[in-house]
Image (cartoon, rainbow, N blue to C red):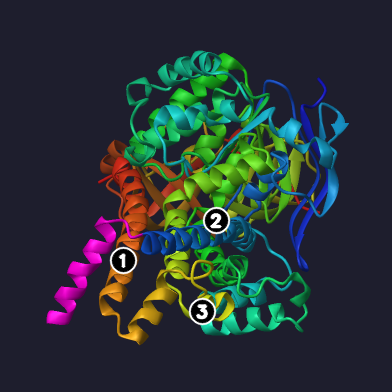
Amino acid sequence: MEIIWEGIKQALGHILTADSEVLGITLRSLWISGAATLLSLAVGIPIGIALALARFPGRSFAVSLINTGMGLPPVVVGLFVSVFLWRSGPLGFLELLYTPTAMVIAQLIIAFPIVAGLTMAAFQTLNPNLRLQLLGIGASRLQLLWLLSKEARLPLLAAVMAGFGGVISEVGASMMVGGNIRGQTRVLTTATVLETGKGNFEIAIALGLILLILTFAVNFLLTHIQQREQLRWPKPS
Amino acid sequence: MAEALLSLHDIRVRYDDLTVLEVDSLAVYPGEILAVMGPNGAGKSTLLRLMGLLQQPTQGKINFHGREVAPTDGLAIRRRMASVFQEPLLLNASVYDNAAVGLRLRGLDRRAIEQRIHPWLTRLGIEHLARRQARTLSGGEAQRTSLVRALALDPELLLLDEPFSPLDPPTREGLLLDLERILRETGITTVFVTHDRDEAFMLGDRVAVLIDGKIHQVGAAAEVFLRPVNEAVAHFVGVDTKLSGIVETVNEGLAQVRFNGGCVEVAGDFQAGEHVLLCLRPEDITLSAPGEDFKSSARNRLIAKLVKIIPWGAHYRAELACGDSRLVGLITRPSFLELKLHEGDDAVASFKSTAVHVIKRK
């Protein structure tokens, strides 16, 4: 127990004194996972909407792919991204392996099926006749998508939370494609693994705590928005 | 007749090999209320979706103001119409925001929207609910909001898809009366789809009867109600007594028609030997006890056995067997109590020769 208390005390010290290395790792984690989440929203939301609203040949297959993708093991993603970005790989000429960009790509691949799957589910909870109703009062296709997205905003926030939660906490792919290079690709999860391996528990606990606080803060904010919206619309008795 | 506001020509809607709608021609004229009436699954909603340009037909063309609607002008024409569906389908927002959504889609500014919305909120009696969240509304209030949303658009064509069917009878009645008044006052061209014949005849200037995807009859409401063109329409408009018969004799506009159970006199132009279907509405049949000194100008009096008596709202519905034929009449509660008739008793069914609508059979 003593090792844990000591770890927590030292962790708080690192946090309160804004240790430059810890701060750097935290900010890097935030921007890599933030960028991956934003990109996954840009890719996943349109795919989710298309799967929910459109009927086309191969749709069931595409839905199955997305559902499988929602549970994709990060190490498998890391392996494939590594193979593709390897110097002799198909995209080796881009020289992206062991860069933050490679980590964003890997995290994007992990997050977008989650976002797409939950977006699809969010749109499928809407009354299918709402589409016809909105078209029936003069909505253009774009206005229709905007209004439906607004209508599905509560479950869509859950998609954002799940996407961000999936990538900020992921370690396997980041380690494989980022390489955990100090000052360049070291993020909270990979640093925690490294420090634990070295027996530097106080640093590892500090990093773990920061990761927890960060995840909690982002989810708290999104949950707050979601629940506030929910409370504004009490169900009729 | 004026040029049709909207017309359908040689329309077919098929799902795989199944043809669900087959309309050779149907027109909606400016200022009229066309009620499209038919049983569940007849294709009414599909027809309304086609009219609202919310669905493409498999075949055929739709004209708006005499011009064929091209795929490129779908949005522009849709914005000259407004649809109200069976469910209110409101957004998760306030009543006002829901009412305003169509106007916002058209890019109107806040002041113009306010000026358009408020009179309609007042007219439909929901001004006091403007700030309420749509989720908290009752069914009737929600459907009123849905109507405000459509009417505020000042549509050239209003399309109503069974908007009253989910409502309880008093709410439905109130909304139906309000809508009838509003449509008469404003003269908005309306297509109103319903399976309820009372609603259709109350609101419709003309009534189209759609059964199994085909329009069987279109005409003035009274015409369709009293003179159905075939057995299917007769059944749907509430003709419960349908007797197959053959014209025996014809004399000065009156024909004697024999059916399995007796002979009746009907008015009209017929030829002896013609096969006909005699249609009688239950309210046109009067019942009396045999031997009773019953004063009536009715030319037809049939002795029939009372098979079943069922309470029917403010009336009793009496089913009678006359030979192999079946007659159905309605009796008021006081008459029923006075007659002291019971199931199994004989009764006299009387009706005028002019009350019988005759469908000639080929």
Count of numbered circles in the view: 3
- Give the residue drawn at x 71%, y 80%: A84
Residue that label 3 marks: A175
Q: B55 or A85, which lies in front? A: A85
Res B280 visible: no
> Could you say which disc has been placed on residue A212 in the image?
1
| Chain bearing mark 3 | A
Looking at the picture, which amino acid does disc 2 mark?
A: Leu
Mark 1 or mark 2, which has the lower sequence index?
2
Crowd class of label 1 (few under 14; some 14 to 19; many from 20; radius 10 Å)? few
Looking at the picture, which amino acid does disc 1 mark?
A: Leu
- The x and y percentages for residue A4 are 18, 78
- The x and y percentages for residue A104 are 58, 66
Looking at the picture, which amino acid does disc 3 mark?
A: Met
* Contact check, label 3 and label 1, Cβ < 8 Å: no
> Mark 3 to mark 1: distance in Å?
19 Å
Q: Is residue B81 left or right of residue B84?
A: right
Magenta span contains residue A4 = yes
